[in-house]
Each structure stands twice: as structure tokens, then as C-alpha cells.
Amino acid sequence: MRLPRHIAILLDGNGRWALNRGLTRPQGHRAGGETAKRCTRNCHALGIQALTLFGFSTENWNRPMEEVQALIVLLEEYLYDIAWELAENNVRLRLSGRIAQMPSRIHQAIAFALQKTAGCTGMILNLAINYGAKPEMVDAANAALGAREKSINSSAPAREFFHLDQEGFRRFLYAPDLSFPDLLIRTSGEQRVSNFLLWQIEEAYYYITSTLWPDFDLQELWQAILAFQRRCLQPSRESQPAKEK
Ligand code: IPE
Ligand code: MG
């Protein structure tokens, strides 16, 4: 049975999970971090090729300062924590987002985790940090303009930048070599895309579960994959040309 190649997860519900237990929001985020580790392990074990996790959005800066600070500390701990296990499992780390605008402590943690997993050739864990899909497209457009400028000023032929097509634009996105997600999961029952991978989810199956992210376990992952497989098997979907809406 066909497995999704690339699963992208809009993880949501840490705050509500904590509230339900009389815990603080940071405690919910800590539990969410543990779930992210478990989910990565499970995807690796199942043979998924790429997993994108929406860890921190460009909108998350608007949260109360204490929560943002807690998220940064947890993110730093998480990056140091996962580096060893990723390396052991041959999982390569990727980052998507406006990383340069993150605090320097995060840069150090990222550098450490990237260095540890640099030689890995297995599953890709793509962490979306300080990520927003519209900022990504703006960054891609600016990168394309910069490249065009450079090519005009050099002797190299500039034509490809004057006629940027979809494939050409894609090369300026944060993770151009990654296949687009074929399964997009959102937890906590919200039915919104929340500025996540707008360019890349054109063909993805969308799976929403009411389960809050910290409770998202192997069984939940299987449910999502089974729903994906059921929909792939539907003849009406199969017979549609890939680009038809
Ligand atoms: C997702 O959980 C956490 C992040 C990715 C930062 P939330 O913090 O949005 O949890 P709810 O929506 O308040 O329950
Ligand atoms: Mg939320």
C-alpha cells in the first residue's frame, strides 16, 4: 500500500492540552516537543521520506512575551536533544523559515544539530521555524530578484531570470529539493491552513483530527495514513489528472 512520501504537520493544541490538565502553556509546549520527537521516530520507522513540522510560525511572535520566551528555550533544548537521535537514525535535519531573525542561542543549537546530521542520508526532518508561507514567497521573490540582478551584472545569460516560471520560482523556496507534501495533517480540530506551505500543498490530502498535538501518537499517525490510502484508492481521484482541481 502506498505510503505518503512527505507528511507535513500543522501541530496545534498544546495550550488546550495543558489547560485541560491544569498545567501551564509552556508545559503544554514541552509535551508537544516530546510528541514531535515521537512522531519523527514513528515516521522514520514507517519509512516516510520527509516530515515537515510547523514548530514556530511568524505569527507566534504575537503571543505574550513569557510564552514566546518559553517557546524559544524549549526549541533550543529540543534541537540539542534531537541531534543525537536523528544522527543515529540517519535522519537529516532541514530548516525552513526566517532563521536569521531567530535569537542567537537558536542559531547555535541549529548549527549543532545540522552539523550532527550533516552526513545523514535517510528521512528528512524539515523544521519550519519562524515560518510563514507568505513570508516564504516574499523571500523567494526577493531571492529571485537578487539572482536576476547578479546575472545581469555578470556575463552569464540572464534569460532564465527574466522568464521565471513556476519551476523556476520553486527553486527559491526554502527547501526546493524536498518533494511537496502529499499528506497534510492538522491536529486539534481547527480547519485552517494558517499560512503553512501555501505553495507546496497544492496536491496534498488534508487530514484533520480533533486530537490535541501532545496526544498525537502512533495510532493517530496510522489513522491519518490510512485515510490517505483510502483516498488514494478512490477511482475518481486516481483518474483525475494531477493538476486538475
Ligand atoms: C501549537 O499549540 C503550538 C505551537 C506550534 C507554537 P498552541 O499553543 O497553538 O495550542 P492552542 O491552540 O492554544 O491549544
Ligand atoms: Mg493554536
Image (cartoon, rainbow, N blue to C red):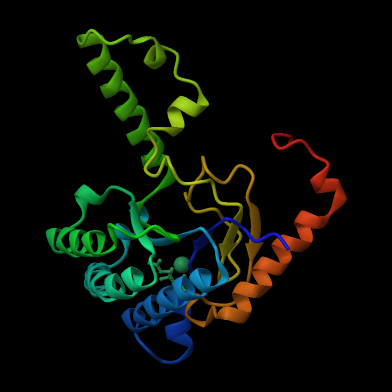
Residue 158, x across and y down, in percent: 33, 10
From this view, report whether residue 12 is shown above or below residue 157. Answer: below
Horizontal and vertical percent for residue 142?
31, 28
Q: Residue at x 44, y 28 (%)?
A: 169
> Residue drawn 51% across and 26% down?
166
Quadrant position of residue 192: bottom right
Please state which of residues 70 and 145 is positioned toward the viewer in this rendering: 145
- Front residue of this view, candidates 157 and 98: 157
Q: Is residue 131 above or below residue 136?
A: below
Q: Position of residue 185 (x, y in %)?
A: 58, 63
Quadrant of picture, ligand 1: bottom left
Which quarter of the picture shows residue 68? bottom left
Residue at 58 percent of width and 55 percent of height:
5
Q: Is residue 20 visible?
A: yes
Residue in front for this viewpoint, 94 or 16:
94
Residue 33 in percent (x, y) is at: 37, 76
Residue furthest out toward the bottom: 22
